[in-house]
């Protein structure tokens, strides 16, 4: 399994906090009960609020969002955040009032000012906070990248601890039930809506903590890869049911090697575990381009076999071998995911941009959706939109997160929709990118 790689609302609280009773990873057999950190995000722009909130949620920090300082100050009286992201808009006095309220309440968490105002104004407000004995972090100027927020959380030791460079065997991880699946949002980058999710394997080791695939996938034998594939299918189907209970039907993608896929009783697994909900969008199984190019006939046969069970195939890391596929009359894939090597800097790179456009057009010619992966820059998102790309994934749009964090994010988005009456869950990061 390949390793992975993020209308002006009324002045009111734009989302209630996610439930805070369950500890992170409560379903994991080796999880321990710990308090989930809480972050407040105060900004009149809903897109910025959602963007920051998305990053916090993905990093393991619960969030509350506020459209103005008054709503924030009222909530602060009953909740104790670990960090406050406070926007300084044209009316800097509102931010000053919030700083004074935090100081008077004896707040001990961190305060992160965010703004596109001039440095002199921001430094004066930061100084006011320091005079209130508040922990004021260096000012963060807009627009900012996902990595800037992640760095702040890392320095404060909030959220998930960083992964370590440990090595374990996949067989041991499977035998000891250390494997769990994290979910990364898949965004319709043109409509700015949540369109799906992709599951990525993680190993929760009792000593090393959460390990990425690079720590347990190298050297795995075929039997273990097949077992992992089955676990991925079952986990994705169960997660789909949990999401559906929130009123959100999302197609979930999993990565399974072709050699493992042909050995799995996919039809039986789906029949046993599929969510019995109206309008279930099914599963997507990602195969690497390299496997598809050499096994196109087999891929076609699997597509026909899986179709009655709402299971579709997709090509991952697509682009390097596209020339060999262009001469085919049809390709039986629901999605073609552009190789991240071409997506990076596609907004400015004169070599990558035309390749991305060619691959996107090829996907559409076969009736497939084009997906840009590894998105970390707003300029690349906008470039893909202009090329007609359908979906996007990447740390800019949301990083992989445990299922409970993903559920919390869905709940929060549902509350945002109910409050703002906007009708659809926005892809906040793209909206933020457009305003940047």
Image: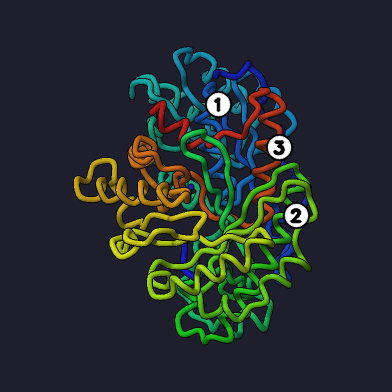
Which mark is on residue 46? 1
Question: Residue reaching furthest left?
Answer: 350
Q: Residues within 10 Å of mark 3 (few under 14, many from 20)?
A: many
Q: CA distance from mark 1 to mark 3?
A: 16 Å
Q: Is residue 436 left or right of residue 241?
A: left
Q: Is residue 111 visible?
A: no
The relative height of residue 218 versus residue 105 in the rendered view (above or below) is below
| Percent position of residue 370, x then y | 43, 49
Q: Residue at x 48, y 76 (%)?
A: 166
Dot 1 or dot 3: first in sequence order is 3
Q: Nearer the viewer, residue 400 or 164?
A: 400
Q: Which residue is mark 3?
A: 17
Q: Which residue is mark 2?
A: 241
Q: CA distance from mark 2 to mark 1?
A: 29 Å
Number of on-image labels: 3
Where disc 3 sits, the SS reads loop
Location of residue 293 by image quarter: bottom left
Q: Residue at x 33, y 38 (%)?
A: 383
| Percent position of residue 299, x then y | 50, 70
Question: Mark 2 and 3 residues: CB-CB less than 8 Å, in contact?
Answer: no
Q: CA distance from mark 2 to mark 3?
A: 23 Å
Judge depth for marks 2 and 1 and give the one in front.
Answer: 2
Q: Is residue 131 visible?
A: yes
Quadrant that contains the C terminus:
top left
Q: Residue at x 40, y 66 (%)?
A: 289
Question: Residue reaching furthest front?
Answer: 329
Judge depth for marks 1 and 3 and give the one in front.
Answer: 1
Where disc 1 sits, the SS reads helix
Q: Is residue 85 left or right of residue 415?
A: left
């Amino acid at each position: 399994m390949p390793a992975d790689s993020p209308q002006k609302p009324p002045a009111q609280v734009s989302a209630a906090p996610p439930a805070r009773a369950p500890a992170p990873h409560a379903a994991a057999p080796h999880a321990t009960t710990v308090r989930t950190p809480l972050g407040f995000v105060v900004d009149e722009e809903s897109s910025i609020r959602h963007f920051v909130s998305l990053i916090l949620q993905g990093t393991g920090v619960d969030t509350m969002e506020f459209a103005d300082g008054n709503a924030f100050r009222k909530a602060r009286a009953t909740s104790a955040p670990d960090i406050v992201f406070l926007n300084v808009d044209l009316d800097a006095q509102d931010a000053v009032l919030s700083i004074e309220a935090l100081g008077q309440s004896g707040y001990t968490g961190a305060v992160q000012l965010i703004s596109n105002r001039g440095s002199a104004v921001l430094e004066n407000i930061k100084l006011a906070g320091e005079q209130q004995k508040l922990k004021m972090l260096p000012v963060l100027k807009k627009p900012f990248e996902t990595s800037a927020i992640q760095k702040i959380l890392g320095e404060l030791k909030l959220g998930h601890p960083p992964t370590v460079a440990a090595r374990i065997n996949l067989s041991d991880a499977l035998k000891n039930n250390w494997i769990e699946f994290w979910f990364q949002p898949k965004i319709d980058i043109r409509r700015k809506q949540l369109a799906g999710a992709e599951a990525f394997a993680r190993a929760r080791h009792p000593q090393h903590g959460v390990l990425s695939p690079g720590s347990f996938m190298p050297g795995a034998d075929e039997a273990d890869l097949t077992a992992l594939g089955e676990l991925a299918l079952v986990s994705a189907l169960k997660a789909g049911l949990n999401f559906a209970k929130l009123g959100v039907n999302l197609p979930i993608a999993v990565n399974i090697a072709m050699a493992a896929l042909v050995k799995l009783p996919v039809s039986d697994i789906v029949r046993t575990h599929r969510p019995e909900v109206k309008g279930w969008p099914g599963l997507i199984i990602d195969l690497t381009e390299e496997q598809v190019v050499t096994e196109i006939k087999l891929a076609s046969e699997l597509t026909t076999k899986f179709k009655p069970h709402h299971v579709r195939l997709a090509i991952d890391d697509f682009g390097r071998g596209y020339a060999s596929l262009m001469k085919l009359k049809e390709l039986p894939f629901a999605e073609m995911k552009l190789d991240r090597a071409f997506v990076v800097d596609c907004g400015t790179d004169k070599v990558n941009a035309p390749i991305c456009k060619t691959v996107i057009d090829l996907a559409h010619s076969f009736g497939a959706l084009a997906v840009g992966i590894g998105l970390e820059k707003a300029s690349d998102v906008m470039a893909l939109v202009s090329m007609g790309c359908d979906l996007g994934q990447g740390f800019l749009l949301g990083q992989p997160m445990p299922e409970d964090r993903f559920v919390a994010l869905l709940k929060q988005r549902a509350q945002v929709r109910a409050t703002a009456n906007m009708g659809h869950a926005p892809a906040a990061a793209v909206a933020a990118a457009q305003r940047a």
